[in-house]
Amino acid sequence: MVEIIHVNEQNVEDSGFFCMRSKPKNAGYQKKLSWLKERFTEGLSLKIIQEDGKHRGFIEYIPGTHTWRAINAKKYMVIHCFWVVGKSKGKGYGSMLLDECIKEAKTLGLSGIAVTTSNKTWLPDKLFFERKGFTLVDKMAEFELMAYHFGDDKAPHFYNWQETARQYRNGITAFTSHQCPFTHDAEMNLKEAAQELHIDVQMIELDSYQKLQQQSPTPFGVFTVIYNGEFLTYHPETKNNFLKLLTKKRLKQES
């Protein structure tokens, strides 16, 4: 049997939120749980699709006024996360989840749906959305903003905070938020790598949608690492991967 679970403040501790479900005691999981409970009051929706009692995919979205992406999309619903487990693809589960989002956006009188995509990891791939009628409305580096319109309002666009990165020229600056449960472990991995390389680290927590929209140097917003004023990565990496990225970047900057 296939069903969609509408996750809310009352059932989130029992249903979980798809990611890291097997590690409920992990600090990142608990921080995401607290983050979700606050966001439900701001209009966030989280839907999990399950088959025979097993989670197969999920979608998380929120009205653009309160989005945790660096996007100007006030009259659009913004998808934060969208995922269907590999073996469950091709069964229409993605379409079912997207339909939930479209239906809710129309009920709220919004003008469409927006989603930040990338052909790299941690963000949805644009191919699914292209097949569903989304079009490219903005692009910044490896990030692409796709939108599905059912109103006449101005298309959404990225905030351009790339100048923000250039302000942080000394050592490592990481912009983080609890929107993703994997961020906490990434912070710890980054600190350990920086300590090993004797590099100073500054962590800036984006603890509100206003702060994220105003300060994130990338459209993703959830996690961004800057090294000596230059973008390093938005991926929550292992310690070894951070070591490789930092060493490569340092050699390039010193050459």
Image (cartoon, helix red, strand yellow):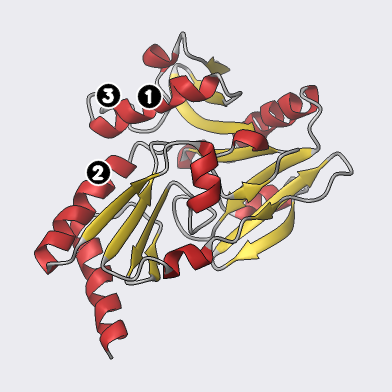
Quadrant where the N terminus sits is top right
Q: Nearer the viewer, mark 3 or mark 1?
A: 1
Give SS at disc 2. helix
Q: Residue at image x 56%, y 24%?
A: 47
Q: Which mark is residue 94?
A: none
Q: Nearer the viewer, residue 80 or 212?
A: 212
Residue on which the image places disc 2: 185
Q: Few, some or many C-alpha atoms within 10 Å of disc 1 (few <14, some 14-19, many ≥20)? A: many
Q: Are marks 3 and 1 in contact (CB under 8 Å)?
A: no
Instruction: Judge whether 41 appears above or below 60 on screen.
Output: above
Q: Residue at image x 43%, y 16%?
A: 12
Q: Who comes first in sequence, dot 3 or dot 1?
A: 3
Q: Quadrant of residue 19?
A: top left
Residue on which the image places disc 3: 24
Residue on which the image places disc 1: 33
- Three-letter code for the amino acid on which mark 3 is drawn: Pro
- For marks 3 and 1, give the CA distance: 9 Å
Which residue sits furthest bottom? Answer: 255
- For marks 2 and 3, give the CA distance: 14 Å
Quadrant where the C terminus sits is bottom left
Q: Is residue 251 left or right of residue 90?
A: left
Q: Few, some or many C-alpha atoms within 10 Å of disc 3 (few <14, some 14-19, many ≥20)? A: some
Q: Who comes first in sequence, dot 2 or dot 3?
A: 3
- Three-letter code for the amino acid on which mark 1 is drawn: Leu
Q: Is residue 101 left or right of residue 122?
A: right
Q: Quadrant of residue 194?
A: bottom left
Q: Nearer the viewer, residue 183 or 42?
A: 42
Give SS at disc 3. loop
Give residue 69's position: percent from left, percent from top: 55, 46
- The answer to whether one can see residue 76 in this image is yes
